Structures are given as structure tokens and as C-alpha cells.
């Protein structure tokens, strides 16, 4: 398996623009997580899905952030409008089961909002 | 939110030395995971622990799930230069109405 695949690897955008981050989880994994990593706050869980259904989005910082999982092999994290403070590395991870949680991470998308 | 504490925050060791780091919380966790992150990459799972008292090894790495379920440690024996990186612990508290959270990390530097 190719592992969790994220795109793009790097994104530079201007403040106010819409940004869409993409994730393809490992095939067969039921859980998908979106994390944000910054020096100040470390790894923060934004939202996670089980079988394509959002279970907990309490970590989503504001209404400007939204996430979808239209099918088992694809998820998006959208920021609209983007702000400089959104600059961070965004990771997607997937896990095969809740009873033996072991999340596997993608390589991340480094977002810079200028 | 639930907090995990990791110690030490950073450490510098000589190649060949053994390393020990730990992760603690004031609350019970039902899963402990240890990850390593290299610069520019995502965290990579090293060891997963699912039962209190469980001791698991992965090559030169050994981790234990504390009996109280509030802590875990990771040991690395005979360190090598490629052990350099940030080591994160993560815990699962979904069964307690919370979530899957990460500690702040321990940054390991190995001197030749």
C-alpha cells in the first residue's frame, strides 16, 4: 500500500483566498483524522471521520474551516477565507480500527498564507 | 482539552548511549502510541500499546504502558545517528468522550 497520500505537499496562497487540502487514506481504514502542526501548539486534532461520517469536529478552529469525506478514499480540508495565522503543516492520518487505534500519517501539506 | 506531558523536552546524547523518555497524564488512557517525526515528514508509528502493563519492543526500541494507565515510557538502546528526531507520545481517550491527543514531543539529538 502506498500509505496515506496528501496533496499538495506545499501551498502558498494570499490572505483571503480559498485553500483546499486533499487526502487519500490507506485502503480499508475506517478512520480518518486531520491534524494541524505548529511550533506553538504542536499537533492538534481538527476533526476525525469514521466510515466517512464526521464524528468530532470540536478541534476545527473556526467556521472558515470545513472538512468533507465524500467516500472512503478521499477527504478534503478547506479553509475559506485563509488568514496568515492558518500557516502550518496539515496532516491527514488514517487508522484501521477504533479498538486497536494506530494512526498512520501522510507526509503533510505545508501551508503558507501571505 | 486533555493534556499529555513529555519529558525531557530535549536531550543530547552520545552515539551508543541508551535513551529513556516518558509521557504522563493526569487522566487514564486506553491506548498509548509512540511516533517519531523527521524534519519535513509526517510522524511515523513506532510502537502501539493497548493494555496496562504491556511491554513491547520494536528492534532497539522498547515501550511500556504504565500500570496506572496514566503514563508510558520509551527506551532506545545503543542510539545511532538516525535516531535523531522528535518523539511524540499519543493517547486515545475516545471511550471517555474525549479524543486522540499528542504530547508536545521530545527532541533527540545524537552526537557522533
Image (spheres, coloured by chain):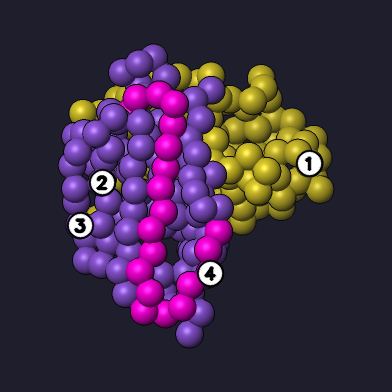
Chain colours: A yellow, B purple
Distance (Cα) linking label 1 and label 3: 42 Å
Which stretch did the figure color magenta?
B10-29
Closer to viewer: mark 1 or mark 4 = 4
Helix, strand or loop at label 4? It is strand
Front residue of this view, candidates A105 and B76: B76
Same subunit, labels 1 and 3: the answer reads no
Same subunit, labels 2 and 4: the answer reads yes
Disc 1 is attached to a residue of which chain? A
Say whether residue A22 is left or right of residue A16. left
Distance (Cα) linking label 2 and label 4: 23 Å
Closer to viewer: mark 2 or mark 3 = 2
What is the x, y in percent for residue A62?
67, 22
Q: Earlier in the sequence, mark 2 or mark 4?
A: 4
User: In the image, what residue occupies the spot 31% across and 18% down?
Assistant: B95
User: In the image, what residue occupies the spot 35% across and 69% down?
Assistant: B18
Front residue of this view, candidates A112 and B37: B37
Residue B57 image label? 3
Front residue of this view, candidates B62 and A78: B62
What is the x, y in percent for residue B17?
38, 74
User: In the image, what residue occupies the spot 60% across and 33% down?
Assistant: A78
Distance (Cα) linking label 4 and label 3: 23 Å
The residue singled out by tag 4 in the image is: B12
What is the x, y in percent for residue B29?
33, 28
Helix, strand or loop at label 2? It is strand
The residue singled out by tag 1 in the image is: A84
Q: Is residue B19 visible?
A: yes
The residue singled out by tag 2 in the image is: B64
Disc 3 is attached to a residue of which chain? B
Amino acid at each position: 500500500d502506498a500509505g496515506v497520500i496528501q496533496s499538495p505537499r506545499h501551498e502558498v496562497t494570499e490572505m483571503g483566498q480559498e485553500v483546499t487540502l486533499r487526502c487519500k487514506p490507506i485502503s480499508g481504514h475506517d478512520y480518518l483524522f486531520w491534524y494541524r502542526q505548529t511550533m506553538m501548539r504542536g499537533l492538534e486534532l481538527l476533526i476525525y471521520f469514521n466510515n466517512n461520517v464526521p464524528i468530532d469536529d470540536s478541534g476545527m478552529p473556526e467556521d472558515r474551516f470545513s472538512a468533507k469525506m465524500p467516500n472512503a478514499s478521499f477527504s478534503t480540508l478547506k479553509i475559506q477565507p485563509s488568514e496568515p495565522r492558518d500557516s502550518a503543516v496539515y496532516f491527514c492520518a488514517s487508522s484501521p480500527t477504533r479498538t486497536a487505534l494506530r494512526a498512520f500519517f501522510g507526509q503533510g501539506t505545508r501551508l503558507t498564507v501571505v | 482539552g486533555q493534556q499529555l506531558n513529555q519529558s525531557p523536552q530535549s536531550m543530547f546524547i552520545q552515539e551508543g548511549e541508551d535513551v529513556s523518555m516518558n509521557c504522563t497524564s493526569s487522566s487514564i488512557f486506553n491506548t498509548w502510541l509512540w511516533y517519531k517525526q523527521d524534519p519535513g515528514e509526517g510522524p511515523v508509528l513506532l510502537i502501539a500499546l493497548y493494555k496496562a502493563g504491556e511491554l513491547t519492543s520494536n528492534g532497539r526500541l522498547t515501550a511500556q504502558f504504565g500500570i496506572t494507565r496514566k503514563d508510558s515510557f520509551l527506551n532506545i538502546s545503543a542510539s545511532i545517528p538516525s535516531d535523531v528526531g522528535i518523539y511524540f507520545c499519543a493517547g486515545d481517550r475516545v471511550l471517555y468522550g474525549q479524543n486522540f491527543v499528542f504530547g508536545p514531543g521530545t527532541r533527540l539529538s545524537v552526537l557522533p
